[in-house]
Image: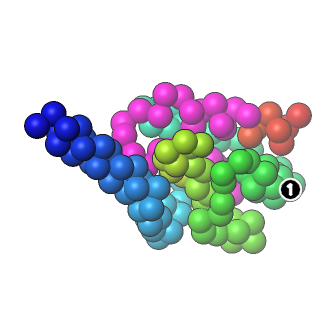
Amino acid sequence: MLFWIVALVVVLAGAAVAYVRLAPSDAARWNQPVSATEDKDFGNGAVRVMPATDGLLARLDAAMRALPRTAVLAGSVAEGRITYVTRTPTVGFPDYTTIEQVDGQVRILARSRFGSSDMGVNAKRLKGLLATVQG
């Protein structure tokens, strides 16, 4: 009996990991305008807002593309909004980062897809991203 319980737990855990890793990312859902107008940290993400300067959006795009396990989901510098998917190294949990230039500001929203807490990972990613492009 114990064998079957353990086997069931292993199968369910494998299915959960497979779902997290293989669930499709809907570009229309995640590549939305960033409505925040000031910096904020919240349970599963963070927002950073700064004045737009010449080339800032392109530098942020290059820095995001250089991050490990990160790919463009939708958008482009020319469109003024880009959304990226960054996955955790082991399980592959997806985090979405949207960078948008609008109304003289660059707004960055980083959030996790699953769970109510990202344990500060998105805020830390944004801190490193900004240090890269401003340093």
Residue at 70 percent across and 32 percent down: it is 127
Quadrant holding the C terminus: top right
Residue at 75 percent across and 56 percent down: it is 65
Q: Quadrant of residue 128?
A: top right
Left or right: 116 with respect to 87? left
Quadrant holding the N terminus: top left
Q: Is residue 16 above or below residue 45?
A: below
Numbered disc total:
1
Foreground of the two, 1 or 51: 1
| Tag 1 secondary structure | loop
Mark 1 nearby-residue class (10 Å; few <14, some 14–19, many ≥20): few
Would you say residue 28 sits in the magenta stretch?
Answer: no
Left or right: 107 with respect to 51? left
Q: Is residue 104 visible?
A: no
Foreground of the two, 37 or 128: 128
- Image x and y of residue 40, in percent: 53, 33
Residue sitting farthest toward the left:
1
Left or right: 13 with respect to 65? left
Q: Which residue is mark 1?
A: 55
Would you say residue 104 sits in the magenta stretch?
Answer: yes
Residue at 66 percent across and 60 percent down: it is 71
- Image x and y of residue 48, in percent: 62, 39
- Image x and y of residue 31, in percent: 53, 63
Left or right: 125 with respect to 11? right
User: Which residues lie in the magenta part?
Assistant: 100-128
Q: Is residue 15 visible?
A: yes
Foreground of the two, 37 or 135: 135
Residue at 83 percent across and 42 percent down: it is 133
Amino acid under disc 1: Gly
